Image: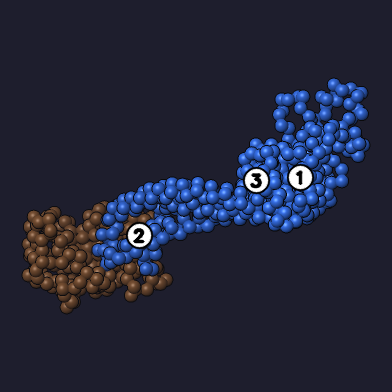
Amino acid sequence: MIELSDIAFAYDTGGFELTAALSIAKGEKAAVIGPSGSGKTTLLHLIAGILVPARGKVAIDGQTVSAMNDKARRRLRLSTMGLVFQGIELVDYLSARDNVLLPCRLNRSLRLDRKTRERADALLERVGLSEAAGRVVSGLSQGERQRVGICRALITKPTLVLADEPTASLDNDTATSALDLLMQLVEEHGATLVMLTHDKSLLPRFDRVVHVEKGVVS
Amino acid sequence: MRSAGYLAWKYTSAHRGRTLILIAALGLLLLLPVAVTLVIRSYDARMGARADATPVIIGAKGNRYDLLLQALLFRDGRTEDVPFGLVDKLETDHAFDAYAIPLHARHTTKGAPVVGTDLDGYLAFRGLSLKRGGTPDLMGQAVLGHGVAQRLDIGVGDTLTVDRENLYNLAHTMPLELDVVGVLNPANNADDEAVFVGMKTAWIIAGHGHGHDPEAHQSEAAHAAAVTAIRITPDNVDTFHFHGDEADLPCSAVIVLPGTDKDRTLITARYNASPMYQALRPAEVMDELMGLVLRIKRLFDANTALVGLAVVMLIGLVIALSMRLREAERRTLHKLGCGRWLIVQTQLVELAIVLAGALVIVALGSAAVVLASPWVLGV
């Protein structure tokens, strides 16, 4: 369960403030919508522990993320979360397969065995990238890169998937199949999904919708 | 560390060209001073050993370094000749006990010095032994150093023509064709690269003696046009002769083996006082020469240090630019859950890979320098 209570956050550069009070149940699929610059990504980064609120509490499954130090927050991210970033953010010199396997390499508690590699290949196959698995991602298209990003978020079977507009750079067909995959895997593992999107046509597929407007979460 | 190693390896593999340029730049920079030090050490060791083993050298007054290089390495420098009679004079002087070995190293054959000497005396003095064949018993015969024989791929029974001094001087003596009668065992010094002949053969090469070919009388013009080298055979050897007194014929230097240290002191004192001669203790001159070389090396080292500093600064700049370019990657890894230390570790491992590559270049280059230095230096 995700619990954000009495959150206040402002960037050092100023000009933007986010206030939030939000609760998302375990296994729930929540869509976060709002105009650009409203604070959606900031909200996602607060949940992930990438950003720390100036005030208030962020808790995931009873663990107060906002009270943890950087190391503990990073560990929590690696062990329980799968992240899909808005800017895709892959490691350019790694192959698609190696990017997918990256969280397993970074997390010492995870084993990078044959089964994990097979799982990476299976994920890539499900998003239509089996032939590109060995290719360096700098040579892939935006859509292909985003699909690799989705596979990377799911490789560790996370209990919480945080996705920042994962279908924004995909064509309709690929976006649908990528979202299908995301939804399917989230359901398979009973994971919680928080996904930012602009696409209102996707909202019926979510259990609930969170609105963010001018830094206010409702 | 495992993750850092993995990322670093992947990064350097993906940027092979850039990495190889860095490795090459650093490797060559490190190799240069190491190679110079190794060459100087090798030169010092080999020349030092040869100089230590040579008690006294006597030659004409002049540059003592030239005389040293002439007598030890057979380099034909600007030294004047001394008369062959000096050998007899040294050996018969009642003031001291000495054995003298004449040297005449003024000519070359296929780039190798042709060294005229008292062959039995020289081979015994240097501890040289024959690998194949024997020593000359006729003028015009030669014994090859091991290196020359290998380099020219010739052996006993083959011939070698002495290099012409001046191709356009038709009046000059024709070059002598040498019969190879022996090849020496390797000595790992300048003797390996020399062609040894008797003193009389050396004098004939230098034009101080000549023969009369009976066939030449029949048609001198035709003969001169057809014959490109003189050859001494059992049939014509008796016609070869020297005009004037043998004692006046030239040597480029004389190696002197005094009976005792006292004899050595007497010989050097006497001949250094002479207006015509100088007597060297090779080990002392070698030390002077190495002192000069080391002073030059210190200048070279200072220059290398400056160039090194510039290269290190450039490499630092490359790393700093690379870090800026990889800021997005650093942020991504951090968002995924990676510590800052891993990023630093990754870059350190990348640097270690570059350094390891550079050290491989240094190791291989140093091995090549060590192997090639005797050949390059001719010592």
Image chain in blue: B
Residue B356 visible in this rendered orientation of the protein = yes
Amino acid on which disc 1 is placed: Pro
Sort mark 3 into few (<14), some (14-19) or many (20+) by Cα contacts within 10 Å.
many
Colour applied to chain A: brown
Looking at the figure, which quarter contains the N terminus of chain B?
A: bottom left
Q: Residue at x 71, y 43 (%)?
A: B253
Residue A158 visible in this rendered orientation of the protein = no
Q: Residue at x 46, y 47 (%)?
A: B299
Provide the chain ID for the residue under circle 3. Answer: B
Callout 2–callout 3 Cβ contact below 8 Å: no
Q: Nearer the viewer, mark 2 or mark 3?
A: 3
Q: Is residue A152 above or below residue B247?
A: below
| Residue named by callout 2 | B347
Amino acid on which disc 2 is placed: Gln
- Callout 2 and callout 1 share a chain: yes
| Residue named by callout 3 | B68
| Image coords of residue A7 (percent x, y) | 9, 68
The tag earlier along the polypeptide, 3 or 1, is 3
Q: Nearer the viewer, mark 2 or mark 1?
A: 1
Say the numbered circle drawn on residue B102: 1
Sort mark 1 into few (<14), some (14-19) or many (20+) by Cα contacts within 10 Å.
many
Q: CA distance from mark 2 to mark 1?
A: 65 Å
- Callout 2 and callout 3 share a chain: yes
Q: How is the image coloured?
A: by chain
